[in-house]
Amino acid sequence: MASALERRGIVATYELHDRVLSNRSSRRKFARRHPVLDELQQDILQRLRKDGYAVVPFADLVGDAAVWPELEAEAARFAAVTEAGLAAESKGGEAALRRREGKEFLVRKYAYGVELGLDDPWLRLGYNRRLLDVANSYVGMWSKLEYVDLWYTPPIEDSERKSSQRWHRDFNDRHLLKAFLYLVDVDEDTGPFEYVAGSAPGGELDHLWPWRPLGDNYPPEDELAEKTADRAVTFTAPKGTIIFCNTSGFHRGGFAKTKPRVLATVTYSSPASLASLTEPNYSVTGAETNGLDPEQRFALS
Ligand SMILES: O=C(O)CCC(=O)C(=O)O
C-alpha cells in the first residue's frame, strides 16, 4: 500500500513538472534561444520525429577529425582493462569491474556516483553542441544530460535474454533521447541494438503497452514480436556509428553471442524526469562550466 502511494506520488510529481513546473521553464528557454540546425541535424530530427530513431556516422555529425581517434583509443583502453578483469574473475580472482544489479551482464566504465572533469572525453561527447542541439530540438526544451557511460558487453553462453536484452520501454521519461556510439563493428553476434520504429509516444505504435511514468514496461516478448514484427529494426553497423533514439519506445540489445560489444551511451532527459524519476550518474568537478554555452551549463547542472 505504501509503495503504491509512493508510486502515485512520484507519477504526480513527474506530471506536474512536465506540464507546469520545470519543463515549462525549460521549453521557454528553448523558445528564446533556438539552435540553428544544419541540414544533417534537421534530417536527423525529422527521422526521429517520424520513427523515433535516426542513424548517422559520427564523422558526419561531429566533423572534428581529432575527436574520433581519441574516443577509439580511450575505448580500446577500457576494453583491455575490462578483459583483463574478466580473465582474472574467471580464474576465481577479484577485479574492480563496475556492474549494476539487474544488468550484471555488462561492465560499465562509470556506472553511478562518478565525478567527471569537463575534459572527460565521454562527458565532452554528451555536451557537444552537435548532439545537444539535436536532443534539445527533439524534446523541444533544454534537456539535462542525465547519463554518460561506456559499456563493455561480453559474449555470453546464456540462451535466455535478461532485463534490457528483452523488449521494453524506459520508464523514466517521455521526452527522452539516447545516443549510442558503436566503438566496435556490430553484427548479429555482437548484441546489436534493436528498436521498434514508431513506438515512441506520438508514434503510430504508441498505443501498444503505452508508455507511462514508472509503467509496467516489459510486455511478453512473443506478443510484442507478433504485433511489431515488420517495424523492428536491428542496428548492425560499423564502429563510428551513432544511433539516436527515444527509448521510451520499445527497444532491446546487448545480447552478445560470440563477440564483445563496446559502446558509449549518453542520455538526454527532460528536467521533469530529474525532478522525480532519475538521477544523473555523474557530477562535474571543479565547477568550471563558466566557459560553456548556457545550453551546455544547463545540461550539466
Ligand atoms: O544495450 C542495449 O543495446 C540496450 C540498452 C537499453 O536498453 C537502454 O539503454 O535503455
Image (cartoon, grey):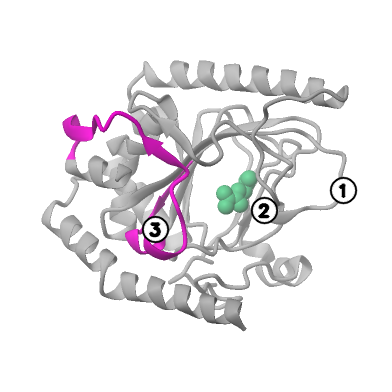
Q: Quadrant of the C terminus?
A: top left
Location of the N terminus by quadrant is bottom right
Q: At which x and y percent is residue 225?
A: 72, 66
- 4 and 140: which one is in front? 4
Q: Characterize the local packing of mark 2: few (<14), some (14-19) or many (20 or more) Cα atoms within 10 angstroms.
A: some
Q: Amino acid at mark 3?
A: Leu
Q: Is residue 277 magenta?
A: yes
Left or right: 230 in relation to 32: right
Q: Judging from the image, what secondary structure is the residue with disc 3 in?
A: helix
Mark 3 touching mark 1, by CB under 8 A?
no
Label 2: element kind: helix
Residue type, mark 2 in image: Ser
Residue 174 is inside the magenta segment: no
Left-right relation of 270 to 157: left
* Residue name at image x 57 percent, y 28 percent: 183
Q: Are marks 2 and 1 in contact (CB under 8 Å)?
A: no
Give whichever of discs 2 and 1 has the lower sequence position. 1
Residue positioned 47% across, 22% down in the render = 71
User: Which marked residue is nearer to the observer: mark 3 or mark 1?
Assistant: 3
- Mark 2 and mark 3 lie on one chain; the one further toward the N terminus is 2
Location of residue 111 by image quarter: top right
Mark 2 sits on what residue? Answer: 164
Determine which quarter of the picture holds residue 185. top right
The residue where tag 1 is placed is 159
Label 1 crowd bin: few (<14), some (14–19), many (20+), radius 10 Å: few
- How many angstroms separate mark 2 from mark 1 (CA)? 14 Å
Residue at the location (37% across, 16% down)?
66
Residue where numbered disc 3 is placed:
274
Residue at point 62%, 68% (across, down): 217
Residue interval drawn in magenta: 266-293
Which one is earlier in the sequence, the residue at label 3 or at label 1?
A: 1
